[in-house]
Image: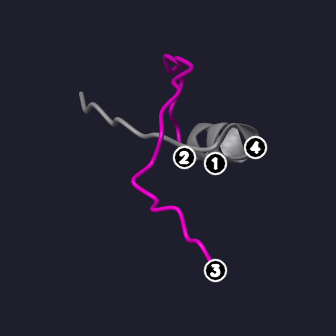
Amino acid sequence: MKLITAIICSEKLSDVKEALFKVGFTGMSLAKVAGHGGEHEVLEH
């Protein structure tokens, strides 16, 4: 048994699920997460 942990955009969820099921994965657990990346605000003068 293997554990795969992935954080993906919600827009790509259906593509990821389809690809995983095609290669034999039969189940998964999903959780919504929210966060803020490490982007720095860019100010132009």
Q: Amino acid at mark 4?
A: Glu
Answer above or below: position of 40 versus 10: below
Query: Does the residue at mark 4 contact the one at mark 2 (Cβ under 8 Å)?
Result: no
Query: Which residue position is annotated with label 3?
Result: 44
Q: Residue at x 48, y 33 (%)?
A: 35
Q: Magenta residues?
A: 24-45
- Which tag, 3 or 1, sits closer to the chain's start? 1
Find residue 37 and report its horizontal and vertical position in percent.
45, 48
The location of residue 8, given as percent across then percent down, is 55, 43
Q: Nearer the viewer, mark 1 or mark 2?
A: 1
Image position of 28 (left or right of 22):
left
What residue would you read off at disc 1?
Answer: 19
Q: What is the secondary structure assignment of the residue under circle 3?
A: loop
Q: Nearer the viewer, residue 7 or 35?
A: 35
Residue matched to label 4: 11
Where is residue 14, by image quadrant?
A: top right
Q: Nearer the viewer, mark 4 or mark 1?
A: 4
Residue 35 belongs to magenta span:
yes
**Among the two numbered marks 4 and 3 on one chain, the one whose residue lies closer to the N terminus:** 4
